[in-house]
Amino acid sequence: MKKNELNVLWTNADPITSEHMVFLYAINAKKKKWFDEVRIIIWGQTAKLAVENEKISNLIKIAIDEGVVVDGCLACARALNVEDELKDLGVNLSFMGQPLTDILKREAYLLTL
């Protein structure tokens, strides 16, 4: 049986998709208790969008305030020179290959965008 957790793998750096799908759904999923645990995983170009787009930066802060866990790929953050800025937003950075593999192996809910 799947754990009542939602993981959102966020790789699409389109600001409109990010605002109106990734954050809208993740924040509401946590706020309205659709899932016990909600996590957004920042991967790839979204790391740069997260720090360069003020609206997205604010949505990350709102998500964290609502109880959404926001993790990010450390390798991506370093490659895009945004490691410190992501940490300042409250993003948990680590190498995400193994955590993503663990999510897949335990058959947790994974929404990829």
Image: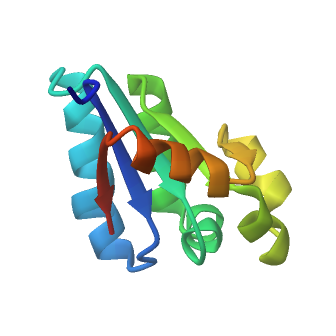
Q: Residue at x 43, y 63 (%)?
A: 10
Along the line of sight, which residue is nearer the eye, 104 or 62? 104
Q: Residue at x 76, y 44 (%)?
A: 87
Along the line of sight, which residue is nearer the eye, 66 or 101? 101
In the rendered image, residue 42, in percent from the top left (x then y), is placed at 55, 58
From the viewer's perspective, is residue 85 above or below residue 5?
Answer: below
In the rendered image, residue 74, in percent from the top left (x then y), is placed at 76, 57
Position of residue 71 in the picture relative to residue 83 (left or right): left
Q: Quadrant of the N terminus?
A: top left
From the viewer's perspective, is residue 17 above or below residue 14?
Answer: above
From the viewer's perspective, is residue 64 above or below residue 94?
Answer: above
Q: Quadrant of residue 67?
A: top left
In the rendered image, residue 48, in percent from the top left (x then y), is placed at 64, 72
In the rendered image, residue 38, in percent from the top left (x then y), is placed at 36, 33
Q: Residue at x 18, y 20 (%)?
A: 33
Q: Quadrant of residue 2?
A: top left
Along the line of sight, which residue is nearer the eye, 29 or 85? 29
Q: Residue at x 25, y 24 (%)?
A: 4
